Amino acid sequence: MSASKARAGGLAIAGLLTLSLAACGPPPPPHSSDPMPPPPPAASVAPAPPPPPQAEVIPPSPGSTVVWEAGHWSWTGGTWVWVAGHYEQRPQPTAQWVPGHWAQNAGGGWVWVPGRWT
């Protein structure tokens, strides 16, 4: 093999290695011309209030750092679907859970107000 071919091969390998290492680094900062992410989906508005809550058997708590989040009805755009309750980890030891609820809006429809931590 000639010296020029060996040098060319070495340069090609060095170039590939450089590209491989560059791909491992952090992503470049976003450019102002990058498109904005899509907005979150609009709240689903139910035409009528949800059915009464379903009875749930609450299992024993797995510990003092969790809170039971009761099940609730979800409107899928055409039918009501029950979302089962579950235990949720407290974000802080003193955090209190404020349950979500359905509220009637000014137009007469019903919207879900998500629960939140205080």
Image (cartoon, rainbow, N blue to C red):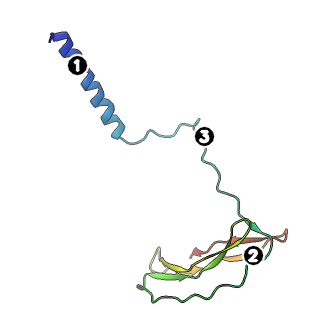
Residue 101 location (% of width, % of height): 68, 78
At x 18% / y 16%, what residue is drawn? 6
- Which residue is depicted at the point 58% across and 87% down? 56
Residue 75 falls in image quadrant = bottom right
Q: Between 23 and 52, which is closer to the camera in this rendering?
A: 52
| Left or right of 113, for residue 97 | left
Residue count near mark 2 (Cα–Cα under 10 Å), binned few <14, some 14–19, many ≥20 = some
Residue at 67% in and 57% down: 41
Measured from the top left, where is residue 96 in percent x and y? 54, 81
Instruction: Please tell me whether residue 26 is drawn above or below residue 74 in the rendered image.
Output: above
The earlier-in-sequence mark between 2 and 3 is 3
**Element class at badge 1:** helix
Residue 39 in the image: x percent, y percent? 65, 52
What residue is shown with label 3?
35
Q: Quadrant of the N terminus?
A: top left
Please give the label number shown on residue 64. Answer: none
